[in-house]
Amino acid sequence: MKFAKSLLITALALGATALTAFSQTNISLPNTQPYYSISNIVMANGGFLIANDVIAGGQTFTATSGTNNLGQQIQPVGVTKSLNVSFGFIVTTTNTAGASYVATIQAGTGLGDWTSLSPVLPLNPTATFGGATTNSVWSTNATYNVGGYTAFRVKTVTSAEAATTNATYSVSFSCKPGI
């Protein structure tokens, strides 16, 4: 009986050790390169690709360098497998002009195969909302059938405002797994 008990305890201890070893994440495999992984930033439901970034008038800002216009670090966002992903584009201005803004979203599989989604997200307060007022907030959105793409980032944001003005913009996303 003592032998059976000892054997059972040893088997349980070995099983627990094996489970601990195999349950670790980010296991490094030999002879592989460090490929881009979205395992730590996969999100469901919604969030922001870029939030509350400042853009000067007359500027096309390229967000593919890994920092926003304020120089803060941004990362591509991975979503749970969804066929349709919606993106929103929100602009807050302090001026009364209301020139157009455009955001371009890119999608990829996480292996550097970025492709721009079409159409872009245009926002023209004068045409769409009949003009602008001081401290105005405008938004637009679009839903894309993203197929097998699971990683998303902002490629560019363009402001057609006068060079002496600025605005704050955010690009949001929303998805529902499996749909």
Image (spheres, rainbow, N blue to C red):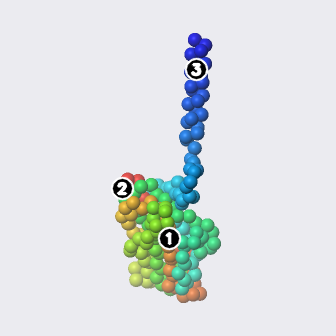
Q: Nearer the viewer, residue 100 or 60?
A: 60
The CA distance from mark 3 to mark 1 is 58 Å
Q: Is residue 144 above or below residue 32?
A: below
Q: Is residue 75 left or right of residue 149?
A: right
Q: Which residue is mark 1?
A: 154
User: For the point 55% across and 36% down, which residue is it?
Assistant: 19
The mark that comes first in sequence, 1 or 2, is 1
Q: CA distance from mark 1 to mark 2?
A: 23 Å
Q: Which residue is mark 2?
A: 179
Relative to 111, say whether 93 is above or below. Answer: below
How far across and how far down the image is residue 40, in percent? 55, 54
Q: Position of residue 152 (x, y in %)?
A: 48, 65
- Amino acid under disc 3: Leu
Question: Of the residues shown, which amino acid type is indicated by label 2?
Answer: Ile
Quadrant in which the C terminus is drawn: bottom left
Q: Quadrant of the N terminus?
A: top right
Residue lying furthest front: 31
Question: Which residue corresponds to the image point at 58% horizontal and 20% vertical from the top-left?
Answer: 7
Q: Secondary structure at mark 3?
A: helix
Please indicate, yes or no, whether residue 156 appears anywhere in the rendered image. yes
Question: Which numbered tag is attached to residue 7?
Answer: 3
Could you tell me which residue is drawn at 54 percent across and 68 percent down? 50
Q: Count neighbours of disc 1 (C-alpha within 10 A) and say few if under 14, some if 14 to 19, many if 20 or more.
A: many
Q: Of 52 and 132, which appears nearest the observer?
A: 52
Compute the Cα span from label 2 to label 3: 49 Å
Quick one: label 2 or label 3, which is nearer the N terminus?
3
Q: Position of residue 153 (x, y in %)?
A: 50, 67
- Badge 2 vs badge 3, beta-carbon distance below 8 Å: no
Pointer 3 and pointer 1: residues touching (CB < 8 Å)? no
Secondary structure at badge 2 equals: loop
Q: Which residue type does callout 1 highlight?
A: Val
Q: Nearer the viewer, mark 3 or mark 1?
A: 3
